[in-house]
Image (cartoon, helix red, strand yellow):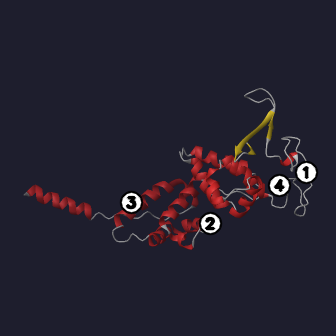
Amino acid sequence: MGNSQNKNVSTRRTENVYVMPPTPFMTEEEFFKTWYIWKNDFLLFRRALIGTNSNKQQWGSMLLNLMGPIGQNIHSAFTFDSPNDKKNINILIQKFDEYYIFSGKKKLPLENVYEYINELELMIKEKNITNGEELIRKKILTEINKHQFTNAANNLIPTFIFSSDFNKLTLKEIAFIWELYTDSDSCTKCDRIHFSEKCPALEKQCSKCNNWNHFSRKCPTNYINNCDYCGDGNVKTFKFYNVAFVV
């Protein structure tokens, strides 16, 4: 009888334990040092109260309130596909994870695309994250202009459709196409500025790949001297839809 009463008391004590919410971040440096610990404390707090409120929007607001001005300032730099996503707890957690992983880095206007993606890969490697390419791909999606990317891709792959073909591209392929439209004033065939249909590269043969309608300086190939595999000089390319890209 006594044992039964002790068990009941123990159960009630467990049920009545109050889980404290995490405290607001004082600095952005603190966010980068403690985000994963803070997030786990928040999720524990949420699980303890989930029975009273499972609304994703309300929990998103709770997250931002608990993070304080530092978290709210970080949140203000995020981009969202829908206004409703701004307070969606699941989307917010994903956004803050990404911000933590990449230290809030974004591509600068004149920054080389290849160097930028390489830097993202190094950040992933330093944090020992396994699904790095997937995370980088998601981050790129938040930064590229889908319309401009599609137009640049269509110059090489006329059948390219963003919604179905973007995820088929490797990071190198994405970088190549992204680089094509970063300098939007210059032509992707001749590297000059001109009126449409007045490209000086039309009907000109490339001295690198022997294909037509682009100058060698805009050739989507990269000539390799002393190849590691065969010892000779050759054009090093990769293929997507039978189109050659720089590697």
The location of residue 128, given as percent across then percent down, is 54, 44
Residue that numbered label 1 is attached to: 203
Q: Is residue 195 visible?
A: yes
Q: Of label 3 and label 1, which has the lower sequence position? A: 3
| Extreme-top residue of the structure | 231
- Viewed as shown, does residue 99 lie left or right of 117? left
Q: Residues within 10 Å of mark 2 (few under 14, many from 20)?
A: few
Q: Is the C-beta separation of discs 4 and 2 under 8 Å?
A: no
Q: Nearer the viewer, residue 64 or 213?
A: 213
Left or right: residue 78 compared with residue 233? left
Q: Say whether disc 1 or disc 4 marks the residue closer to the N-terminus.
A: 4
Quarter of the picture containing the N terminus is bottom left
Which badge, 1 or 2, comes first in the chain's sequence?
Answer: 2
> What residue is shown with label 3?
44
Q: Which residue is mark 4?
A: 188
In this view of the protein, which residue sits in the foreground, 187 or 57?
Answer: 187
Q: Amino acid at mark 1?
A: Glu
Q: CA distance from mark 1 to mark 2?
A: 46 Å
The three-letter amino acid code for the residue at tag 4 is: Thr
Q: How far apart are labels 4 and 2 at the CA level?
A: 31 Å
